[in-house]
Amino acid sequence: MSTQNFATKALHAGHDVTKNGGTRAVPIYQSTAYVFNDSDHAANLFSLAEPGNIYSRINNPTNDILEQRLAALEGGIAAVATASGTSAIATTLLTLLKAGDHIVASNSLYGGTYNLLSVTLPRHGVTTTFVDPSEPNSFENAAQENTRAFFIESLGNPKLDVLDIAAISTQAKAYKVPLIVDNTVATPYLLNPISYGANIVIHSLTKYINGNGTTLGGIIIDAGTFDWTNGKFPEFTEPSPGYHGLVYSEALDAAAFIAKVRIEGLRDYGGALSPFNAFQIIQGLETLEIRIKKHSENALALAKWLQEQDEVTWVNYPGLDTSPYKSLAEHYLPNGQSGIVTFGAKGGFDAAKIIADKTELFSLLANIGDTKSLIIHPASTTHQQLSDEAQEATGVTKDLIRLSVGLENIEDLKSDLKNAFSIVKQSYLLHN
Ligand SMILES: *Cc1c(COP(=O)(O)O)cnc(C)c1O
């Protein structure tokens, strides 16, 4: 299986047709619980003496195929699916950390993640220092005695900064903490963070992997490479009161973390993925390679076109020659740089707001990674609760428009933007 190429694994990994009644499509196992042979069988399942299904909050055969498939595509040893990308991040951090622990995170993060780290987790005693990930040694310099994780996005949303994952992984190794990478925007087709030293990879499956804006989901993938016995993680080396004295590092070895996510994280926080949603996400995942190639091609073409427009002051796309991340993109994202483009509207906040309001093919909404093109003006919508400093740190300027470039014909996308630009011009003529 592991010698197969991406497109083949995306269609087949984890699905043994002989074990699923010969169904060529992955079936939906819409069952809350599973019949035990007898009480001894149940006891063996609960004590992990025997593998098997107990209850769909913990495990489900449809989810299992999605988990195996994404672990194969990212080069991990195992994965756990969750109800959303946010649930994947929260479940990972809540499984790993306790009050008093500390995280070092990139300052260029998805708005929801930024809030979790900066506002919500501190209420539970877990604090975060945000650093500029483009500064050399910034993670190591911010690490404290109680630091227990480094957290980054491989391709930041919406700053579109490409991170030097290998360099950050070296700092994580020196500090003996796991490097957690949210790989949502890049997708496993364009980038595999584990091959550059990431220990845990997270995706919002809601975005490109499902791909058509119908379904929420998330995944936690364990590289199986982190040494939990290094003295900083007693929850893995001492008997767990949360699982009748199980010592994770002894009983589960390389799979200690991902097993704890499933049998404690899903059990206690409950963020399980619905098997119906797992089925929907599998349909999307089958065509990820051809879609993300086309998203990347359309985004690059549109970014180049935007650079030539009078109404646009700057364009940010990692594939452009003018991008400060061009050389990192050539190294980490040689097969495409995904479908997100940001640009500055001449006329600032007001002009940007009009453009977002007046496009028709580009839908005004808060999402990315849909087959349909999407637009948003973050300063007046998704990021309006953030302070000016926080907006700046996350890369959101007043004039910034974010596009999620879909799979429509590129000429139609240009016409739609051109039309919105001309409305801005007219409104300026009328008001001046
Ligand atoms: C959307 C997104 C998330 C959150 O995922 P949900 O499925 O919406 O909960 C996390 N990280 C990134 C980079 C995202 O784009």
Image (cartoon, rainbow, N blue to C red):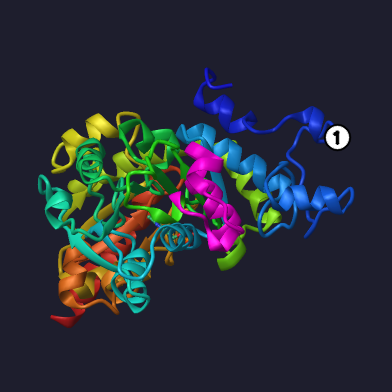
* Residue 210 at least partly seen: no
User: In this view of the protein, which residue sits in the foreground, 157 or 139?
Assistant: 139
Answer left or right for 96 relative to 158: right
Rendered location of residue 195, percent (x, y): 35, 30
Identify residue for label 1.
21
**Does residue 279 appear to the left or right of 411 in the view shown?**
right
Which quadrant is the N terminus positioned in?
Answer: top right
Q: Residue at image x 28%, y 71%?
A: 118
Residue 192, how many percent across, how many down? 39, 35
Picture quadrant where residue 270 is located: bottom right
Position of 20 with respect to 383 (left or right) is right
Ligand 1 within 8 angstroms of badge 1 C-beta: no
Nearer-the-camera pick, 307 or 241: 241
The answer to whether one can see residue 8 in this image is: yes
**Residue range highlighted in magenta:** 237-265
Write the residue at 46% across / 53% down. 238
> Does the magenta run of residues contain 263?
yes
Picture quarter containing residue 102?
Answer: bottom left
Q: Residue furthest bottom?
A: 431
Residue type for callout 1: Gly
